[in-house]
Image (cartoon, grey):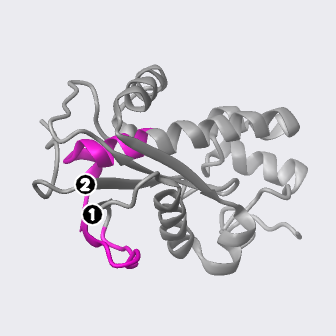
Amino acid sequence: MLQSFHTKNVYEAGCDEAGRGCLAGPVAAAAVVLPADYEHPLLNDSKKLNPKQREKLRIEIEENALDFAVAFIDNHEIDQINIQKASIKAMHKALDKLKSEPEHIIVDGNRFYPYHQVAYHCIVRGDGKYYSIAAASVLAKTYRDDYMSQLHKKFPGYGFINHKGYPTKAHRAAIVKYGITNYHRRSFQLLDKQLEINF
């Protein structure tokens, strides 16, 4: 059973990202503030849910959250500043979009940069421990998946609708066949080491 909050009696936001390990597309992050007594039997780390469950929970979260926001950092900025900084910047950007600044932030993982003067805690595997972080993981994942599905329409040969930019064999085979798009992360290892391609 996930916990409803980390710190009592504060306006607490949970943050998480999606797409960190992808070869193409943006990294997405969400910030979610839930009621202090919020519970849901299905809500969990988005990676443990199937697409239909995530879509159902997205509606549930958006209807019941006190506040939520989603933000992207594109592949070009990822290449400029690196994926860790881009992931945290996306979380900050999502927090900026909330209607009210939180009094406390809980973040999935072990790295975060101070956000204004707001107290925060990093929680390893937090998306499987706290509802607000799990909710953020669901929103970040579903919004990013929608983006990649739209990108699939522009570049159907890459199979973005299936792998969402992750480094699958099919994705890497498409890179060998077609080259890279303007949405690929050039700072990432786009192909297996034994393969070579000139970009």
Instruction: Give the camera-side residue of 37 and 80.
Output: 37
The span picked out in magenta is: 110-138
Which residue is at a point 51% across and 62% down the rendered structure image? Answer: 96
Which residue is at a point 76% across and 35% down the rendered structure image? Answer: 150
| Coordinates of residue 176 in the picture (x, y in percent) | 82, 53
Task: Examine the rendered structure and indicate whether residue 57 appears above or below residue 166.
Answer: above
Q: Is residue 34 left or right of residue 181?
A: left
Whichever of callouts 2 and 1 sits on the residue coming sooner in the sequence is 2
Q: Quadrant of the N terminus?
A: top left
| Coordinates of residue 133 in the picture (x, y in percent) | 31, 49
Q: Amino acid at mark 1?
A: Glu
Q: Residues within 10 Å of mark 1 (few under 14, many from 20)?
A: some
Instruction: Give the camera-side residue of 100 and 89.
Output: 100
Residue under label 1: 103
Residue under label 2: 11
| Coordinates of residue 22 in the picture (x, y in percent) | 60, 55
Q: Residues within 10 Å of mark 2 (few under 14, many from 20)?
A: some
